[in-house]
Image (cartoon, rainbow, N blue to C red):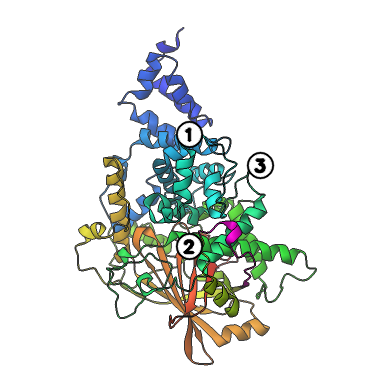
Amino acid sequence: MSLFTLPVELLEHILVHCAYEGHPESIFRASQTCTTLRDLVYNPSVELLWREAYLSTLDDPNGPRGILVRFLDWKHDYSEEFCWKKNFIAMLVLRKEWKATHFSLDTAFYENLQQNLRSLLSLTMDLPPLLPDRDTSRRAVFLDNLLANGLPELFVHKLIGKRDLSEWVNSEGVEDFRSKILAPSWEEWPLGRLFYQVLFHTSFRPFVAWSCPDVETQRDLARTVARHRVYSMLYPSRLRCWGPFLRCTHMTLAGNPTQPTRPHELFPDYPFLSAARIVVEANLRSILQLDSEVETSAQVYPLFSHPYARRDVYEFIQRIDGKTSVGGDSRADGLNALRMGSGSGFWDGEQTKTRWLRERDEAEGKRSDSDEDGWDWAGVEGIWARAVCWMDYQDLLYHNLSAISPHSSSDQLNHNMRETCRISSTTFKITGYSQPEQPSIPSSKISDHSEEPSPEEGSQDSEEESKSESTSTLFDTLVYALPIIHFSDQPAPGTTGFEAQVQASRSIRGTVRMISGGAVRWSMTSRDNLAGEDEWAMEGVQIGGIGSALGVVGMWTGVDHGRGEPIGELLSPVSCEEVASF
């Protein structure tokens, strides 16, 4: 009996079964064996085969958009513009070429760099929401496996300040890619911005190979390079809304100099944000190592200023390393922690689940009102860990007078920079809501005004342009559809002694709102209650999706934004402790 006497549907089922067994490449190998199987695989009418093959390896790409579309009550169907075959092949090509960079000087990954980085960003940002009844994401597992051996060597060299790559074999094409990627201006070009956006969400991954320093040395070198970026006192600017955002010379600011009148034009500065994350995470790893070498209790002041602080730091590092379940929920391990709603207690927030999923609308058979009362769409209320880092002011001034560029080679950098890092816990409570001021342009035209500024002319095929435009319109519409959340802090449960006195003498208030590209902006002001005046201003961007378990990364500086003000970075992951109820 010949294989080809079987019905076509059964042949398709066999091929899809191979993919579900962990061998999706088998479909392509089968198509190379004979004309009949090639015609079957590449027949335009077998889109169902490609859809099933895609879903055997990755999650439905319309998952995260589906919730947003449903919330906005749009009729747009993203599945109609998604090409299963093309995207499935792109992901397999990414995996093959990414792995090849770890074993040879294969240039295929760099030759196809634009598509590979777009695929990588899609894997990162299109993770399905972590709903209470959902399991681990196949897309997150795919991405975790992809990054298991670290970033490609050339990217690691850029991040650790290694400029002398003379040991590289001068194979054809390598020198061209090396010069472009290592150039200081690369981060200002679209490909560089794609890379740093991925880096911000997935964090620095050391390259595991004999040709690179050991893992800890790579982390130390990456922190040194990143410190030279985040501790530049020239960085804060009115054109950046005094935060980690790209300069926008045409932006109109409201009465508050940190709030643009059209927030869909405000873009995160991912090179700065990724550097801030590298610095804080490396500091947290160092603190845990230092604490483990000291025979003392879990509370080591001033490193850990709260009984739960050390545990929160330990759980955070374990979470991003994917080594243990957090809060008893292994679904939030590793890159699953990037998923929307992966933060502890996110879906338990007041009206969070009913509003996002429109459950109340279905029960009542109607669409809800315009949400004028507001709701906790970002998972603000609860207990948060907070790591704040800063340099001694004299050291900070000396560093800036030295004017060492973060793009300098490693041997020219200052490797003696030191910081103070203080970890504490705080409880946020929502104090109110306000509605974003609607832009003066029609909502259907919002995306036309929100194109990220770029010095490089790029070209995309019509499908990519259509997908990018529709996604941009979706995200930018959310900027004005979601209320601005206002919150303040409360002493963390169990806080006593000196820490309680510190928290009583200072208070935090802030806002959370959407900005361009689906990013969530956190703005906070720290007030000295004893002096009766505001002291520090903090601006940050959410890592991953809305309400992710990895929290917020950003910067802080003086509230007056004067020249010579101190500057530092902060990271606030969601505490694994039970979310407080109010």
Callout 1: helix, strand or loop? Answer: loop
Q: x, y percentage for residue 576? A: 59, 63
Label 1 vs label 3, nearer the camera: 1
Which image quarter: residue 431?
A: bottom left
Residue type highlighted by circle 1: Glu
Q: Quadrant of residue 306?
A: bottom right
Q: Secondary structure at mark 2?
A: helix
C-alpha separation, residue under disc 1 versus residue under disc 3: 22 Å
Query: Along the polypeptide, which appears first: circle 1 or circle 2?
Result: 1
Q: CA distance from mark 2 to mark 3?
A: 29 Å
The span shown in magenta is 407-420
Upstream in the sequence, badge 2 or badge 3?
3
Q: Which mark is residue 172?
A: 1
Prevailing secondary structure of the magenta residues: loop
| Circle 3 residue | 210
Q: List the residue tagged with mark 2.
A: 273
For marks 1 and 2, give the CA distance: 34 Å
Magenta stretch contains residue 419: yes
Q: Could you say where residue 371 lies in the image, as x and y percent from the top left?
A: 31, 68
Q: Is residue 463 left or right of residue 2?
A: left
Give the side of residue 112 with respect to residue 388, left or right: left
